[in-house]
Image: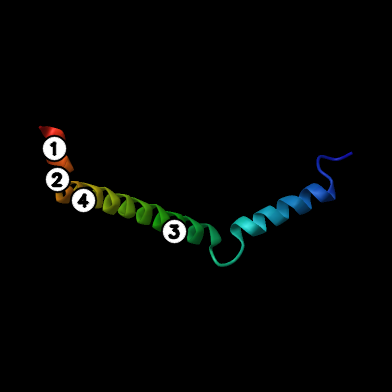
């Protein structure tokens, strides 16, 4: 019994090929993740500005202050 069998090495090889295989997959995945986070943040800002604008138009914001 050695340290690892052939199946262990094959699994390690597959994982390494998936992570570091040609085409720079990790940087591409991280770039897509960053774009998704930026899009989410910008949409959240748009939603909050629309909510405050709709309160001003309805006058519900002024009624709450009185």
| Residue at (16% x, 35% y) in the render | 64
| Residue at (77% x, 50% y) in the render | 9
Q: Nearer the viewer, mark 3 or mark 4?
A: 4
Instruction: Say few, some or many: other residues with alpha carbon within 10 Å of mark 3 (under 14 / 14 to 19 / 20 or more).
Output: few
Q: CB atoms at circles 3 and 4 under 8 Å apart?
A: no
Q: CB atoms at circles 3 and 2 under 8 Å apart?
A: no
Q: Which residue is mark 2?
A: 59
x and y percentages locating residue 52 in the rendered image: 20, 47
Question: Is 56 left or right of 2, judged from the image as shown?
Answer: left
Instruction: Say few, some or many: other residues with alpha carbon within 10 Å of mark 4 (under 14 / 14 to 19 / 20 or more).
Output: few
Q: Nearer the viewer, mark 3 or mark 1?
A: 1
Q: CB atoms at circles 1 and 2 under 8 Å apart?
A: yes
Q: Which mark is residue 63?
A: 1
x and y percentages locating residue 65 in the rendered image: 12, 33
Helix, strand or loop at disc 2? Answer: loop
Instruction: Say few, some or many: other residues with alpha carbon within 10 Å of mark 1 (under 14 / 14 to 19 / 20 or more).
Output: few
Q: Is residue 53 above or below residue 17?
A: above
Question: Is 39 left or right of 28, judged from the image as shown?
Answer: left
Helix, strand or loop at disc 4? Answer: helix
Helix, strand or loop at disc 3? Answer: helix
Q: Nearer the viewer, mark 2 or mark 4?
A: 2
Q: In terms of image quadrants, where is residue 43?
A: bottom left
Q: Which of the pair 19/45 is nearer the observer? A: 45
Q: Which residue is mark 3?
A: 31
Q: Which of the pair 7/63 is nearer the observer? A: 63
Q: Disc 3 versus disc 1: distance between alpha carbons? A: 45 Å
Q: Tell how many labels.
A: 4
Q: Nearer the viewer, mark 3 or mark 2?
A: 2
Q: Which residue is mark 4?
A: 54
x and y percentages locating residue 15 in the rendered image: 68, 53
């Amino acid at each position: 019994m050695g340290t690892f069998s052939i199946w262990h090495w094959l699994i390690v090889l597959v994982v390494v090929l998936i992570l570091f295989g040609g085409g720079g997959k990790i940087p591409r995945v991280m770039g897509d993740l960053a774009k998704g986070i930026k899009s989410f943040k910008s949409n959240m800002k748009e939603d909050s500005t629309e909510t405050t604008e709709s309160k001003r138009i309805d006058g519900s914001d002024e009624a709450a202050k009185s």
